[in-house]
């Protein structure tokens, strides 16, 4: 890093928030994917003004800039792929205001997502997006990755709840998009453009997020299946019955065994799949709907159905689901975290085909996911990472492409090896939008 740059930075950012040592920079060279890129410098800003000054400097000296939250990203979003400067946003956490009357939260990007859930519920409100990493992930990272979670089936993803932003643009200006009003339709919807942009269009320094009334009640049940494809039929039966669960999750046998090995949770090791289904709403409606869902699972071959009778039982069921990702990491040295989406009607066929691929290629393949919206995590665990990745993983991608011809990868951390291209026109629009803002932000 040039001396002129360092001298200017020291006048804007205190020295204890500038990291140049190799060991310190290495801590910011990776996230929860398996890419690794070393930044030239790491800075911990505390407010939008500091970020603005840093970005203006980066423009002058053509230094790439990468905003970063807690580093839980599975898609390589914060990785400094061209060196440059990482902005650690975790110190921007001073604002978490719940506006109960307007049903809003005003938050700094470094606030932990679980803290928003807690504060909202204390006010009788509800913030639905609930990624598995919510206890450590920051809301800023969730916004820029458009995170979802189990409740996405009924309540949608993060973008449905962001109605206003404060953003530092790639040229260093501080702008506001949207606002506190529910209806805000004047001009371009820049808020939605920035949400999900992975820091390529600007750096979020404050967000206004919409809250909704907390459901009166909720309950969860778990169903065990001796055949994976039967669980797929149960999913489609439930979704076509007129019932919309708040969450509908699947774990296959490999997931079950991984979780039990990692942290025993009482899961059935003999089951080929389990479904976790949650219903929320009015207490009387919940009782009727959850019993109907249980009956549908039995009709599709469920060998065991258990409805949680206490809040402790309900929490135990969900804690097992949240352990899947860390648990399967222990199964092999190379875990490829991949998400893909198929139409709901293709879920049973997809499950059957995944089993065939697993057996044919002797692949240690773990399948789990938000079954209700067709978003599946399929995590191959490889012994010889990159070589086997290139040989075997395209077979899985070809299968997903067959069932969803317009499929766009939800999460592909191994950017060097895209399995197929997005359709040309879509790519051009994305590239043009990004270029219009800047080439410096997370290139």
Image (cartoon, rainbow, N blue to C red):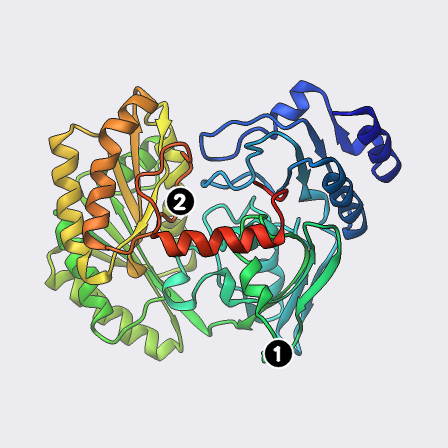
From this view, report whether residue 436 is shown above or below residue 280: above
Q: Position of residue 415 (x, y in %)?
A: 42, 36
- Residue depicted at 16% across the width and 28% down the height: 362
Residue that numbered label 2 is attached to: 411
Q: Secondary structure at mark 1?
A: loop
Q: Is residue 364 visible?
A: no
Horizontally, residue 123 falls left or right of residue 360, namely right
Rendering quarter of residue 282: bottom left
2 and 1 marks in contact (CB < 8 Å): no
User: Which of the 4 quarters of the picture holds residue 82?
Assistant: top right
Foreground disc of the pair 2, 1: 1
Which residue has dot 1 on it? 186
Q: Secondary structure at mark 2?
A: loop
Instruction: Please name whichever residue, 249 or 226, is drawn nearer the observer in this view of the structure.
Output: 249
> Foreground residue, 66 or 231?
66
Task: State left or right for residue 243 relative to residue 443.
Answer: left
**277 horizontally vs 59: left or right:** left
Residue 439, percent across and down? 60, 44
Q: Using residue 294 as the reference point, say whether residue 183 is left or right of it.
A: right
Q: Tell me if I can see residue 397 in this picture.
A: yes
Q: CA distance from mark 2 to mark 1?
A: 33 Å
State the mark number for residue 87.
none
If you read the primary sequence from the N terminus, does the residue marked by circle 2 or circle 1 appear first?
A: 1
Instruction: Judge the density around disc 1: few (<14), some (14-19), many (≥20) Cα neighbours within 10 Å.
Output: few
Q: Quadrant of the C terminus?
A: top right
Q: From the viewer's perspective, is residue 268 above or below residue 208?
A: above
122 to 402, vertically: above or below: below
């Amino acid at each position: 890093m040039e001396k002129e740059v360092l001298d200017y930075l020291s006048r804007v950012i205190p020295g204890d928030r500038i990291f140049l040592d190799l060991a310190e920079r290495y801590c910011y060279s990776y996230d929860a994917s398996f890419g690794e890129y070393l930044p030239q410098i790491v800075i911990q800003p505390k407010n939008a003004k500091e970020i603005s000054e840093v970005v203006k400097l980066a423009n002058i000296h053509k230094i790439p800039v990468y905003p970063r939250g807690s580093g839980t990203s599975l898609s390589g979003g914060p990785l400094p792929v061209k060196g440059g400067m990482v902005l650690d946003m975790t110190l921007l956490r001073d604002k978490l205001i719940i506006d109960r009357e307007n049903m809003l939260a005003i938050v700094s990007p470094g606030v932990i997502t679980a803290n928003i859930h807690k504060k909202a519920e204390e006010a009788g409100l509800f913030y639905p997006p609930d990624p598995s990493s919510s206890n450590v992930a920051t809301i800023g990272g969730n916004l820029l990755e458009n995170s979802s979670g189990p409740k996405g089936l009924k309540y949608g993803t993060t973008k449905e709840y962001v109605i206003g932003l404060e953003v530092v643009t790639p040229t260093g200006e501080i702008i506001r998009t949207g606002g506190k009003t529910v209806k805000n339709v004047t001009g371009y919807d820049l808020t939605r453009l920035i949400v999900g942009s992975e820091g390529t269009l600007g750096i979020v320094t404050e967000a206004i997020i919409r809250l909704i009334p907390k459901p009166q009640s909720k309950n969860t049940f778990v169903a065990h299946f001796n055949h994976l494809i039967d669980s797929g039929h149960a999913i489609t039966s439930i979704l076509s019955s007129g019932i919309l669960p708040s969450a509908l999750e699947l774990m296959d046998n490999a997931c079950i065994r991984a979780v039990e090995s990692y942290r025993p949770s009482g899961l059935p090791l003999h089951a080929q799949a389990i479904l976790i289904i949650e219903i929320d709403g009015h207490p009387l409606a919940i009782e009727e709907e959850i019993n109907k869902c249980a009956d549908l699972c039995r009709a599709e071959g469920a060998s065991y159905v258990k409805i949680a009778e206490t809040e402790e039982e309900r929490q135990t069921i969900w804690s097992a689901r949240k352990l899947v990702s860390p648990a399967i990491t222990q199964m092999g040295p190379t875990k490829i975290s991949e998400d893909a989406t198929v139409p709901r009607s293709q879920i049973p066929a997809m499950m059957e085909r995944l089993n065939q691929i697993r057996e044919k290629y002797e692949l240690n393949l773990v399948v789990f996911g938000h079954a209700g919206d067709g978003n599946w995590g399929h995590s191959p665990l490889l012994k010889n990472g990159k070589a086997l990745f290139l040989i075997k993983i395209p077979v899985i991608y070809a299968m997903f492409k067959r069932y969803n011809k317009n499929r766009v990868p939800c999460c592909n951390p191994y950017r060097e090896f895209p399995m197929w291209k997005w359709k040309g026109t879509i790519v051009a629009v994305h590239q043009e939008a990004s270029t219009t803002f800047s080439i410096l932000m997370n290139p």
